Image (cartoon, rainbow, N blue to C red):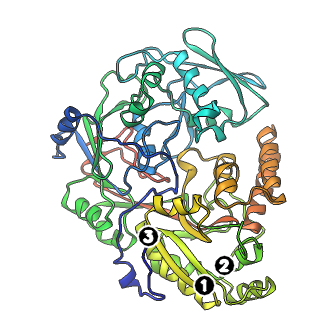
Amino acid sequence: MSRTTPARADRRSFLRLAGAVGAAAAFTGTLAACGGPASTRGAGSSTGGKSGSGTIEAGISYALSTGFDPMTSSGATPVAANWHIFEGLVDLDPVTLTARPALATRMPVKVNATTYHATLRDGATFHDGSAVTPDDVVFSFERILDVKNASLMAQFLPFLKSVKAVDTKTVEFKLKYPFALFPSRISVTKIVPKKIVQADQKGFDAKPVGSGPYRLVSATREDKIVFKKYAAYNGRYPAKADDMVWNLVADASARVSAMQSGRVQAIEDVPYIDMAGLAKKSEVESAQSFGNLFLMFNCSKAPYNDKRVRQALHYALDTEKIIKTAMGGGATAASGYLQTTHPDYHRATTVYGYDKAKAQKLLKDAGVRGIKVKLLLTDTSWVQDIAPLIKECWDAVGVTTTLDIGQSSAQYAKVDQNDFEVLVAPGDPSVFGNDVDLLMRWFYVGTWPETRFHWSGTAEAKKVVKLLDQAAQATDETARKKLWAQATDIVAEQAPLYPVLHRKLPTAWDSGALSGFKPVPTTGLSFLDVARA
């Protein structure tokens, strides 16, 4: 379904807009039927959120858009759920995004420039009680590397040559070339039980079995996900609550009401307009994130194959007004590919400050007059809030704009059928990792430039890939950062897909009911090391 929004809307009217929310991070994947068997659903429904019950209840803003298999899962909600269900040899701390040992006893040990060893912790078991073995580790990596499996994670492991078991506790990794980010990058691979996955991959996708502190009881797409403490977990971050219930509440006002009533102890994606009200009784904090709102152009269609047109539509946006009016100040205008708080932030040589005259000149120089654009937007609530202002800005420079707002899956179906001109959507690959190489490869290598914005055949696109490959093999950190800066400067200047702003992610929680909770700078909520107070 799509909807046309009026050209102008004041703050009060467009902040009332609400809608079902699709996949937050604009990720795609095969949607799995995620409901568990009847017996487990019954157990989940009896779990309450009363104080002292040992149950954490949360309000999640995004429905289940993919299954849980970590090889292919990309939806915001299942990825966050997997933080609790699975472990990698190494995992990222969900708050700091720094790498830390998980199933491994310590960070991988460098044997030589292209060889690493990792040792499993003693007594680690999967949720079915079976031991985690080096064979499971090898299987978990090899299934990602197998091109037949079309794993989303494969693009993050181009350096990996082979994985093999050395003994009953140790795994050896051979690299194609030295890759300084190896110890943290392998966090993209979650370790799965070989026997269970081989027996029924589809069943595993719907009802996953991991080695994490919580096991999945049931999951219903637009209702809830129910977790239970895995008592045999012996890692560093055991579950501190007996049960968790994630209520999937797409409607923003319903999430706020659930928080205000005490039905849940935490919610993500707090509407900016409700932050002050919630702060009277709850903790409310906005974490600056990489998560962005981007413009993506169909570079296979005129006039969007001309970078001047793409640049013009960026310069035409009064981003500061958008942030202030539609987001209550809850974002920062993009001055580079990365947010300013990222440790490797680089101010781009091309920064799209609001410049109406420059936008009009670029359109004139490109020979474009009377352009009409059908702008696709996902129906995430805050994106809908922004939509009328984008139209207002573009109409003001002579670009007649029609808004088509729809569910994420429907909009990306149009994109994948090459039936679009421009898309505005949120994106946040930082749920997989925080290094520049990963954040760049998600959008500019593989699927996105090849089959979505159709830019991969250009000289500039090839240059970006070359720079990323050179940076991946650079042993000197300064040299690596210079190469990354060059790559980000190219995508800023070309703008086939480029951020308009980076969000501050607002989270609310009851500090009197939760102990140890902290908001995360990515889409989702983490309850690792969190207890009911």
Q: What secondary structure is found at the residue carrying circle 2? A: helix
Residue at image mark 2: 313
Disc 3 to disc 1, C-alpha distance: 19 Å
Q: Position of residue 371 (x, y in %)?
A: 66, 85
In this view, 321 is above or below 227: below
Disc 3 to disc 2, C-alpha distance: 20 Å
Q: Earlier in the sequence, mark 3 or mark 2?
A: 2
Residue 533 in sight from this viewpoint? no
Amino acid at dot 1: Trp
Q: What secondary structure is found at the residue carrying circle 3? A: helix
Q: Earlier in the sequence, mark 3 or mark 1?
A: 3
In this view, 150 is above or below 458: above
Labels 1 & 2 near each other (Cβ < 8 A): yes
Amino acid at dot 3: Trp
Mark 1 crowdedness (10 Å alpha carbons): few <14, some 14-19, many ≥20: many
User: Which residue corresponds to the image point at 79% horizontal and 31% vertical from the top-left?
Assistant: 177
Q: Is residue 504 left or right of residue 62?
A: right
Residue at image mark 3: 382
User: Which residue corresponds to the image point at 52% horizontal and 47% vertical from the top-left?
Assistant: 431
Amino acid at dot 2: Leu
Q: Earlier in the sequence, mark 1 or mark 2?
A: 2
Labels 3 & 1 near each other (Cβ < 8 A): no
User: Which residue corresponds to the image point at 55% horizontal and 9% vertical from the top-left?
Assistant: 168
Q: Position of residue 390 (x, y in %)?
A: 55, 80
Q: Nearer the viewer, residue 447 or 527?
A: 447
Residue 448 in sight from this viewpoint? yes
Q: Nearer the viewer, residue 439 or 1?
A: 1
Mark 2 crowdedness (10 Å alpha carbons): few <14, some 14-19, many ≥20: many
Residue at image mark 1: 394
